[in-house]
């Protein structure tokens, strides 16, 4: 293919994207245009219990490759046995929570035993990752006032779930995807580390969330609900500022493409873009940029207004980033 042909093809792709379609035929060549970018009108909490396991690396790869972040509720004994896997969770941009030391029925234990289960896990995770969990998920979702008092003494917020994927009960990949389809703004879904169907569901879960303008977020230690990845307010939350970041196609070449980002609703914003692997950001303009990890770009105002741009080297993956906006 000649160079002029490459430019012509790339221009056609950009035109197709701007028109809102997902693909087009140019001459005899079918071009897969970038998927529609997610404008985050809400956030959901993807959570994975019972790790780390032998499948943790595969789970993290699947999440990163699909531009997703999640909260990992780890079992203390497993962290002690495999501290490197817990550190890998943090390095991949995930959040780590406490899921007890041995996964017992905590409500059947004494207060001292509860305290031991939770405090040992806090110490193991802190030792492995350098971070101290602020979230706790009781095994089996079983809780009572005594347990909540222990959680409070350790600075932990209890997180149950709104949607149970049933992956622990042998749910198929399709059933797990369907369960995620019931999530609404602020809600949390229960899934588990170490289950192949759960890993297989991640691309479809992300596609479904994007189609509904929902994005994976962090779980607020204040409320136990899903919020923007940097802890900002959900859109429309009473008393909290809000903003929206929208993507549009810019110039495109055979190996890279530009995206324009427009922010509305605030002038004091933080925009987070999760870049699907193996694509990479190779240039930005009109922002102050930082990179928590290779697949995440955090953009803040540089004094150049509410519009900025990025250049992405696609490396074979034309899927657009997911984007979220929070006020600062």
Image: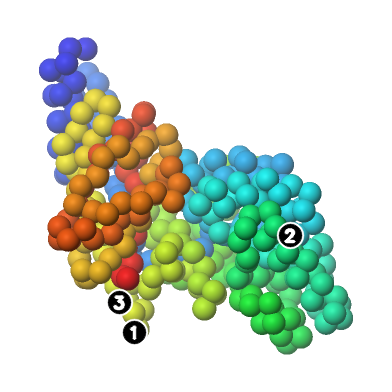
Nearest to N terminus: mark 2 or mark 1: 2
Task: Work out how far the residue at label 2 is from the one at label 1, CA to CA, in angstroms.
Answer: 37 Å
3 or 2: tag closer to the N-terminus: 2
Is disc 2 placed on a helix, strand or loop? helix
Q: Secondary structure at mark 3?
A: loop
Front-lying residue, 195 or 128: 128
Closer to the camera: disc 3 or disc 2?
2
Q: Nearer the viewer, mark 2 or mark 1?
A: 2
Label 1, secondary structure: give it: loop
In the shown orientation, is residue 19 left or right of residue 76?
left
- Which of the 4 quarters of the picture holds residue 6? top left
Q: Which mark is residue 241?
A: 3
**Are dots 3 and 2 in contact, CB under 8 Å?**
no
323 up-or-down from 264: above or below: above
Above-or-below relation of 29 to 171? above
- Residue 72: where, in percent of width, then height? 61, 57
Q: Which mark is residue 239?
A: 1
| Residue under the point 36% across and 51% down | 290
Work out which quarter of the rendered image holds the N terminus and state it: top left
Residue carrying label 2: 124
**Image point (31%, 70%), residue name:** 327
Can residue 172 be spotted in the picture?
no
Assign the C terminus to one quadrant of the image.
Answer: bottom left
Rendering colour mode: rainbow
* Percent x, y of residue 296: 40, 48
């Amino acid at each position: 293919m000649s160079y002029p042909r490459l430019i012509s093809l790339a221009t056609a792709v950009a035109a197709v994207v701007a028109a809102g379609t997902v693909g087009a035929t140019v001459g005899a060549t079918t071009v897969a245009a970038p998927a529609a970018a997610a404008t985050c009108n809400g956030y959901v909490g993807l959570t994975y219990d019972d790790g780390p396991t032998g499948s943790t690396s595969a789970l993290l790869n699947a999440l990163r490759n699909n531009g997703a972040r999640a909260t990992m509720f780890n079992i203390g004994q497993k962290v002690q046995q495999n501290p490197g896997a817990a550190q890998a969770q943090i390095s991949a941009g995930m959040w780590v929570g406490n899921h007890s030391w041995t996964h017992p029925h905590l409500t059947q234990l004494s207060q001292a035993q509860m305290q031991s289960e939770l405090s040992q896990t806090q110490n193991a995770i802190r030792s492995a990752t350098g971070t101290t969990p602020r979230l706790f998920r009781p095994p089996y979702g079983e809780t009572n006032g005594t347990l909540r008092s222990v959680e409070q003494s350790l600075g932990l917020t209890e997180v149950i779930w709104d949607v149970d994927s049933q992956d622990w009960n042998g749910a198929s990949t399709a059933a797990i995807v369907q369960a995620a389809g019931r999530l609404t703004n602020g809600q949390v879904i229960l899934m588990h580390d170490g289950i192949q169907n759960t890993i297989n569901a991640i691309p479809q879960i992300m596609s479904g969330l994007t189609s509904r303008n929902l994005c994976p977020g962090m779980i607020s230690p204040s409320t136990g609900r899903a919020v923007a990845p940097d802890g900002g307010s959900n859109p429309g939350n009473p008393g909290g500022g809000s903003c929206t970041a929208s993507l549009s196609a810019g110039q495109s070449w055979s190996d890279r493409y530009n995206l324009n980002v427009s922010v509305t609703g605030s002038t004091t914003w933080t925009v987070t873009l999760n870049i699907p692997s193996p694509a990479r950001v190779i240039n930005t303009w009109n922002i102050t940029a930082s990179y928590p990890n290779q697949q995440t770009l955090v953009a803040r105002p540089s004094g150049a207004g509410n519009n900025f741009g990025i250049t992405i080297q696609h490396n074979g993956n034309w899927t657009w980033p997911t984007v979220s906006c929070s006020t600062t």
